[in-house]
Amino acid sequence: MAQSSGGGVSRVVASLATGQLASGYRVVVACLPHSGLSAAAARCGAEVLAWRATREPNQGLPREVRDVYQLLESVRPDVVHLHSSKAGLAGRLAVRGRLPTVFQPHAWSFNAVGGGLRIASIRWERAGARWAHQVVCVSEAERAQGVAAGVEAPYTVIPNGIDVDRFGLAEPAARDRARLRLGMAPSDPLAVCVGRLCRQKGQDILLNAWQDIGARVPGARLVLVGDGPYRDLLRHRAPPDVVFTGEVGDPRDWYLAADLVVLPSRWEGMALAPLEAMASSRAVVLTDVPGALESLPPGQAGRMLVPRGDARALAKVVTALLPDRATCDDLGGQGRAHVRRHHDVRSMLERTEAAYEAARASQRPAVGRGRVSRAGGRRPPVTSARRGRSGSAEPDAAREPDR
């Protein structure tokens, strides 16, 4: 279950659904109707149920919680996997530990707010943890943030994984062909940022840095790939050498076209875009937020990580690397080898299955007034149920992030 309709979280959910279906599971994805995630889940063969939820908590929350409860009554899942903060909020309030529940924050909710809202968010995460049989973090740094905030939970760290082969080995001519398809000049130094246009992803910081980069790197171009609530604000501030693509269903060509991929996030769990860029043999520059260090190959952190929110430091690193295509390609080759070793989607699938097994094993007896139906024999999980050879669910098997 996820509220996020696009971005990295939806790609993670779609990857899990694809792998679980291939393993013989039944997969049910509850998400916004007519969204990128609903389309991706349907394409891979998952059952898709409409869950109409807003990104932020508001007066509609009781209705969203009720809808979750009713969805679970109709599906009767073995395992509930909640992706990101809104699904984590509504889902845990609806289930309250009566079913094996896995919560995956994909960056903690309290990172997105300050002041009293941050305090309230931390208090909720502490309280809601008792209704999660497993909390899956996508990096050790994300887990450490939860522990430091006093969120006591059975944690499992499962780094984000991607299908490296889908991105292909980028031979030298791949860049020229991608630029031809996209209408970009073959020789211009090109930086690309892939992500939702929002405060979290920090494109405004990159634009501040670009004033210096553009002045120091002749012919340099910047492309912002994605859409979001900051679109108009960023367009108003951007110089003419910045291109806005809008929503892009498949960013592979933009990775291939790039000399350098930049993600200046203010917070993350572990961003998917840098992994995809490295799978495309592209060098990446990241801000030092949770998951960034763990994404990079050993030895690149000192060169490719900059302090969060520091536009001057970001400009210095990008200015040094962007015109040096040979160095960027060498760093990108190291990145591809690293992603293949440490962020393969098959490892993510296996570890997620283990988290489901652990959630089922640790579930405590249900208490409280409400009830999620447990009658009628073996239930499929909301994200999956393993099928036996006869087509019925096996009796002892159970098997699924952007705010």
Image (spheres, helix red, strand yellow):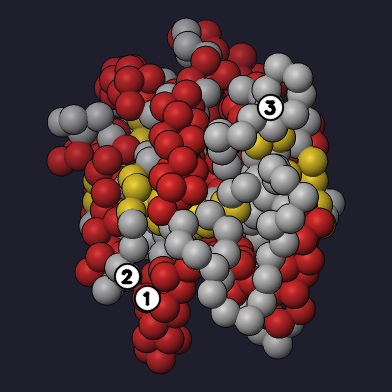
- Local SS, label 3: loop
Q: What residue is disc 3 on?
A: 387
Assess disc 2: are there few (<14), some (14-19) or many (≥20) residues with their C-alpha within 10 Å of its C-alpha: many
Q: Is residue 317 left or right of residue 273?
A: left
Q: What residue is disc 2 on?
A: 151
Q: Nearer the viewer, mark 1 or mark 3?
A: 3
Label 1 close to label 2 by CB (< 8 Å): yes
User: Which residue corresponds to the image point at 27% horizontal and 74% vertical from the top-left?
Assistant: 150
Furthest residue toward bottom: 116
Q: CA distance from mark 1 to mark 3?
A: 36 Å
Q: Nearer the viewer, mark 3 or mark 2?
A: 3
Query: Can residue 357 be seen from the camera position used here?
Result: yes
Q: Amino acid at mark 2?
A: Val
User: Which residue corresponds to the image point at 38% horizontal and 62% vertical from the top-left?
Assistant: 266
Query: Can residue 250 be seen from the camera position used here?
Result: no
Q: Is residue 16 above or below residue 279?
A: below
Residue 108 picture location, percent across and down: 41, 65
Residue 198 picture location, percent across and down: 55, 63
Residue 5 picture location, percent across and down: 69, 54
Q: What residue is disc 1 on?
A: 126
In the rendered view of the protein, which quadrant contains the C terminus? Answer: bottom right
Q: Amino acid at mark 3?
A: Arg
Assess disc 1: are there few (<14), some (14-19) or many (≥20) residues with their C-alpha within 10 Å of its C-alpha: some
